[in-house]
Amino acid sequence: MKENNASITQVNPRKKTNSEIKIPIIVAVSIACAVLILSVTYLKVVLPMLNPVLAFLHNPAPDGKSNSSVELGEDDLFDPDDPYYSRKPEVTPAPTPSSGSDPSATPSETEDPTETEQPSETPTPEPGEFRIEQAQFVHASEMVFEEGTKNILLLGFDEKKINCDSIFILNINEAKKEMKIISVPRDTYVPHSIATKDELKRRKIYDSPGIHKLNAVIYIGTYVIKYPPARFNHSGIDYMCAILSKLLPGCEIDDYFYVYFDGFMDIVDVIGGVYVTSPENMYTDTGELAIKEGLNKLNAREALFYVRYRKRLDSSGHDTYTGSDNWRKLNQANFIAEIMTQVITKENMTYNKIIDTLNVLSKSLFHSLNASKLSYYIGVGNDFADKKYTVYSYVIKGYTIDPFGDNAGYSQLD
């Protein structure tokens, strides 16, 4: 009897094994179902929402290919013996603009480069006092880029998408809650290294009008020489940043934005037009009034006309302007400062608005942003929208030179 009872209560080894693996199988199946559901949700819901953001965050400017054998480094950018390469040893900070300064005053192109403007007595604004000052002219040697500030290079390209039509640097001083919009003359003479000059001669473009200007630097860095891609992995833009750091000591570029004319118009369209204060009436070459003096709401095409306008035509369509490009650069600097208050707002910082905006701009706006950088700039943007920043605008002035006798209109920075 005892043996029979023992045989009855004995556990079947197969049943024991099945019971031990039953729970793990259920867990595995549950996890697989959860992964399947999450995958479908990601593909159908999350990914479509993220695609515009991902496209924006991975949208660097396309680099070209150079077949040149000329390789340059950071220590071989300029020809030290170039007769037009000079730099004042002393650096005086750019004067703080006063609210009563005349933004339309054009500097003399023949003034003594050793003269330095005296700093204004304008006091530092109190915290929370939001101001956007009118642009004013300064010498290159007066621009000081403080340590710890951010420098964003803003490049606007012409319709041929080769040369820079506009070159700006946005300097952000988060500690002082200040922003500087700095217009750099596209006509700035660049004293290229001897190796670069020799390569320009070999390609028979050394004497091409304007080839030695700053606005041709990206073309040269991309197609004429081999400048090793550095921070931005773009030979032309990295070359431009290196040249700017030589022309404007202390200016180390942290990020860039690179936009074509159609991209500029996209920006205006996205925000539904912009309000701009014109310093005077602007006429077309047929004498038609295009933009009236004072406040105007401009659509995309009108805004492009405004930032490119330089002839100062009268009501008969005759050119009355005998100056350089300085007047247009003033208008552009003031334009950027004015539309910043319309673009960087709490309303435009909403998730849906940002997604819509980035989706449009990714077609013609290239940049160096990534996710971590974007979060930083959103923080700065929120502070700007809360009117915590004071914005100053500067136009760097130079001295007209004609190094090649071709009347190309070069500007020499001091």
Image: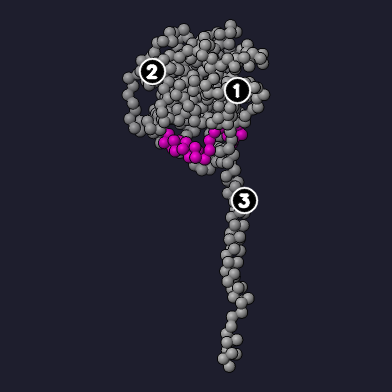
Kindly give the residue lying farthest to the bottom in the view shown.
1
What coloring was used for the rendering?
A: one colour
x, y percent for residue 383 = 41, 36
- Closest to the observer, 264 or 185: 185
Kindly give the residue lying farthest to the front in the view shown.
3
Residue bearing the label numbered 1: 71
Q: Residue at x 43, y 17 (%)?
A: 141
Amino acid type shown at disc 3: Lys
Which badge, 2 or 1, is on the more N-terminal residue?
1
Q: Can residue 72 be seen in this snapshot?
A: yes
Give the magenta-colored segment's residue range. Answer: 360-384
- Circle 1: is it few (<14), some (14-19), or many (20+) Cα within 10 Å? few
Residue bearing the label numbered 3: 44
Q: Residue at x 56, y 91 (%)?
A: 2
> Looking at the picture, does residue 403 appear above or below residue 9?
above
> Looking at the picture, does residue 145 appear above or below residue 381?
above
The Cα atoms of the two marked residues, 2 and 3, are separated by 58 Å
Q: Are the residues at dot 3 and dot 1 in contact (C-beta closer than 8 Å)? A: no
81 falls in the magenta region: no
